[in-house]
Image (cartoon, rainbow, N blue to C red):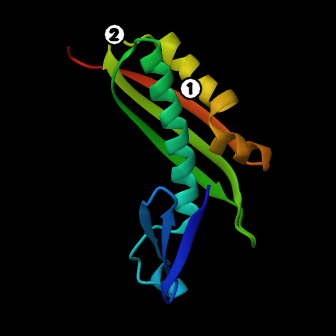
Amino acid sequence: MKARVNWVEDVMFVAESDSGHAIVLDGAPASGGRNMGMRPMELMALGVGSCSSYDVVTILKKAKQRVIACEAEVTAERVDTTPAVFESMHLHFKVTGIDLSEKHVKRAVELSADKYCSASIMMKNAGVKVTHDFEVIEAEG
């Protein structure tokens, strides 16, 4: 995997993945930015939420569950020192579907947390307390 990060101005950067996708990162005005993009640590938290969501949806689809939507609310806390690393991260999944099995959703979240989500497991290995929970929302169908 390769990526490039190019400085634009002040504290704004454009990051481009090897697959050709780009994202703007910028700081708050108090830090010399113009608030034109995500902060790097926000992007890291979103990476964990996205990685785990990918797993949950994929596992549920393989289990023939009728998933309509999956939202992961990511709440992250950082230490109050420099470097301001994450000390904890919580992922709350809202999984919507037709006749979803709560047992299957629970298992999908557990498999992502313990076996498949590289980003989440990497955070845990770095000492971040990562927790997960979920709710199942029944859709009309």
**40 up-or-down from 124: above or below:** below
**40 up-or-down from 56: above or below:** below
> In the drawing, what numbered circle is on residue 109?
1
- Taking depth in this image into account, of 93 and 44 the one nearest to the observer is 44
Dot 1 or dot 2: first in sequence order is 2
Question: Type of residue at label 1?
Answer: Val
Real-space Cα separation, disc 1 to disc 2, in angstroms: 17 Å
The residue drawn where x is 41% and y is 11% is 64
- Taking depth in this image into account, of 72 and 4 the one nearest to the observer is 4
Q: Position of residue 48 (x, y in %)?
A: 57, 46
Q: Position of residue 103 (x, y in %)?
A: 52, 11
- Taking depth in this image into account, of 133 and 109 the one nearest to the observer is 109
Q: Position of residue 137 (x, y in %)?
A: 35, 22
- Taking depth in this image into account, of 1 and 139 the one nearest to the observer is 1
Q: Position of residue 90 (x, y in %)?
A: 59, 42
The image quadrant of residue 4 is bottom right
Q: Secondary structure at mark 1?
A: helix
Q: Number of callouts in the render?
A: 2
> In the drawing, what numbered circle is on residue 99?
2
Whether residue 24 sits left or right of residue 133 in the image: it is left
The residue drawn where x is 68% and y is 28% is 115
Whether residue 121 sits left or right of residue 65 in the image: it is right
Q: Residue furthest left?
A: 141
